Amino acid sequence: MLRRRPKEALRTFALSAVLLFAGHPVLAQPLLDRLLIIAPAAPGGGWDQTARAMQHALEREGLVRVVEVQNVAGAAGTIGLAQFVDSYRGNGRALLVSGLVMLGAIVWNDSPVSIEQVTPIARLTGEYEVVAVAAASPHRDMRSVADALRARPGGVSWGGGSAGGTDHILAGLIGAAAGIDPRRVNYIAFSGGGEAVAALLGGNVTAGVSGYSEFAPHVESGRLRALAISAGERIPGIDVPTLREQGLDVELANWRGVLAPPAISRENRTRLSEVIVRLVNSATWRQTLIDRGWTDIHQDDQAFARYLETERARVWRIVTRLRGSPSQPGEGTPVARLIFPAAVFGGALLVMLLLGIRGPGRARVQPVHHPTNGRAIALVAIGLAAFVILLEPLGFVVAATMLFLAVTRAFRPREAEGSTATGRFWRRQVFSEPALAAVFSALVYLSFTRGLDLALPAGAIWSWMR
Amino acid sequence: MDALTALLAGFAVALTPQNLLWALAGVTLGTLVGVLPGIGPALTVALLLPVTFSLEPTAAFIMFAGIYYGGMYGGSTTAILLNTPGESASVMSAVEGHLMARAGRGGAALATAAIGSFVAGTLGTGALTLCAPFMVDIALRFGPPEYFALSVLAFAAVSTVLGQSVLKGLTSLFLGLVLGMIGIDPLTGESRLTLGLPQLLDGVDVVIAAVGLFAVGEALHAASLVGNRSDELIPLKGSLWMTRDEWSRSWRPWLRGAAIGFPLGAMPAGGAEIPTFLSYGLERRLARDPGQFGKGAIEGIAGPEAANNAAAAGTLVPLLTLGLPTSATAAILLAAFQQYGLQPGPLLFTHEPQLVWGLIASLYIGNIMLLVLNLPLVGLWVRLLTIPRAYLYGGILVLSSVGAYSVNRSVFDVGLLYVIGGVGYAMRRYDVPLAPAIIGLILGPMSEQQFRRALAAAEGSPAIFFTRPIAAALLALAVVAVASSTLTPWYRKRFGPDGIGRQGPA
């Protein structure tokens, strides 16, 4: 404790000052020293906002000393889930933000990992979906959208998040409620909320589907018009009619929660659950809910585990209806989907064919002057292989030292063994080289892990030996 | 002018001694971290975000602005000197920049990058001050058809002019396109070319591909030449600074780069890379002596470096006016705003004028500081080249590995980096250019997705690409670019010997 980093001391001091001024009790000891929250989506979206809001509240309330948020984007969170199951097994200092979308994506992508593999910690918030159009759109309410949909399903394009996500599910349900085959809904998936909002603002899609909070600032500024909300009844403070009121029998809540890695100890599970319960009851979190327009639907780990069971079954029924051979115009037709891969592979084949005809001989003109130093390349390759193999078991410092040494050896000319001037130079250096490599690696390690909060592997073997 | 009065008030905020100090701390940290390969501005801001938790919002954002711009500056240094671009927006700077560095003109290349970044950053910030609301309306007109057309233009601008051999250029390009198809298809959720490896569902990260092809490939290539006297590079030849000729060849590319970079950066799906591709292609076409390209043409650094800094300023337009994060860095800045309970969006300018204008003013100040900081550093950076190559490449490989690991904290990525590095070595061995692979990797997925989105919105009718004026104009430009680059050599060959078209001194 005596040798605290100045940055931390500054942060702690400032934190105390903030808490003092805000009238919070200063907590003597945080429940956790470090916590990693993985947002399985690109920065800016709902899961990312949840993760960062948690980070803010947990640190501000002094529940966890340092919270780190990491984004593992892709495939509606299933990549994040797979990595989470894979790399954090048994780790009691990591949480994964999850939600309805992930359940849908698991079914949609035939994901090899399942939500049953992880440990439910808590359901946190829920947000209702909003259907919105650009201010200039002719549609004034959902009835007119539904009429247009019935007249020509392909003519109404829906912009939203990734395929199989909440937005897609809602668009499909609306289509079904309006009396068309959900598969004929012309849904266009965008990566991330920002891109979908931009497409809607620019009038590039007929309607947008997203969580209320992502549309709210634009509805407020008058650029977007909210047509319907997916809640069962009107939400106080949000002046948007429900889908039911407008003749479409659809209700959908996009819940979000947190999961812990598989196979964590009971003690860790209880502690994480405790951290989240105290988070949910904190003043900062309550204020966050108000600011963001999120609804508190907290469930503790036991209740959430039961809820997940039933929700999983419900989502499976919805998504399997949406999925299958698509019959939408444009996107769904195999031509549009295959044209690009076909062009790439066709072109690549052609290039390879031409290379085959002309042969690499012509290409080799230049390197002929330089005989390849096979020994040096082999040494560098050995160094690289050693780094990959040793990084996790022995830690960064050892692995990097090996890599650095292999490279310096590779670059030492063969005549170094002789008695030329360069040879003497290299021989004099020989003894200090391992030291130099180790010092350099240690410096890199320290500056990244301490200076930048970027954790490099310390080495499993050392922690195991301890 | 409302904006100017508000800006003056902003300067009053930014010019307080404390805030100046935060700006200086920001640009210094940003430059230092940005210099590391594989660690670009987005990661820099993300890593340094916790440092600012304890600051009051205005000071924190002033520091952020410094880190953001500083990271953009730093990214080009290693690209030029060591052929290891730290981020994808610096790839084009590595192409000509490193050739200059090898010829002893590294100092001039760094100087033109720094001054160009300053000029473009300042112009971009000026454009942000004066026409942010107006820019946003134009940017929003860009929908999927326009983005598709833009990607086609970028392909046309760069790919036809890269490398000595068309076949080798295409080999590299298709390699990038195939790499870009790896992963989950975002429109349908199907996985493609992942070889059953879940780590590849995410696709191949551009940073890993760029650092692998350039840095690791370069280290292997250098190792293969050990014991070969002919490949020594010259640390410095002539003046450290830019010569009069280099000045006169630089200033137009700076301005053109800024003009391309800012509007494209302001577009919700524009990014900082495409402007660098377009700028490179344009400069190559307009250069007094196009033969210099491929040998270290200063225009080929001045333009792209200006373009990526102007794009950084452009990114702030949708962020501040609409609250739309359009780049990884902007998304982290958005998170920083929200951390302070601020919602960037149409109302931020009216609700928090002191903060917004303080931030914009500090962008001007940060730019000046970066120039003052970076020009003297040029001499220091150039001396990097005098480090014994064993240590230099050892350091590069260690730092590249850290950069690759930090993307997803995955050892798999480090292995992938080395495999791609091996490919990069093979490409060098057979004299295949590297940049087209990166271009294919960045433009391919964008091109495909926007093409399919456009078709879906138009119910499958390709007419949408020709009936929307902006899309049609961009496609027409692409056709002109391809036609002129294929017809010009033919024309020269056909009429050159007759003396027609030979004007001016040879």
Image (cartoon, rainbow, N blue to C red):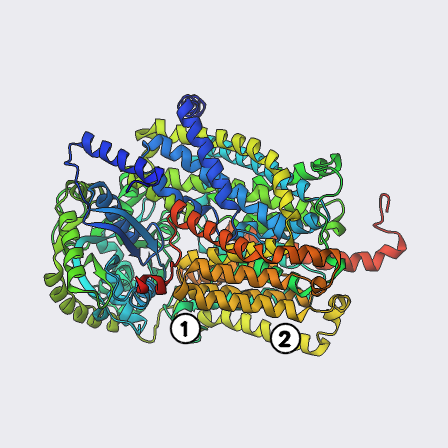
Image quadrant assignment for residue B332: top left
> Which chain letter matches label 1?
B
Q: Which of the pair A416/B503 is nearer the observer?
A: A416
Q: Position of residue A419 (x, y in %)?
A: 74, 61
Q: Position of residue A16 (x, y in %)?
A: 23, 34
Q: Is residue B381 above or below residue B418?
A: above
> Which chain letter matches label 2?
A
Q: Is residue A236 left or right of residue B16?
A: left
Q: CA distance from mark 2 to mark 1?
A: 26 Å
Q: Is residue B502 left or right of residue A174?
A: right
Q: Amino acid at mark 2?
A: Met
Task: Determine the residue positioned at 23% across, 31% down.
Answer: A17
Q: Amino acid at mark 1?
A: Leu
Q: Position of residue A452 (x, y in %)?
A: 40, 46
Q: Is residue B131 above or below residue B151?
A: above
Q: Position of residue B4 (x, y in %)?
A: 45, 23
Q: Which residue is mark 1?
A: B197
Task: Determine the residue positioned at 49% across, 56% down.
Answer: B207
Sort mark 1 into few (<14), some (14-19) or many (20+) by Cα contacts within 10 Å. Answer: few
Q: Is residue B434 above or below residue A225?
A: below
Mark 2 vs mark 1: in front: 1
Q: Is residue A10 left or right of residue B234?
A: left
Q: Is residue B250 left or right of residue A236?
A: right
Q: Which residue is mark 2?
A: A352
Quarter of the figure that contains the C terminus of chain A: bottom left
Q: Which element is circle 1 on?
A: loop
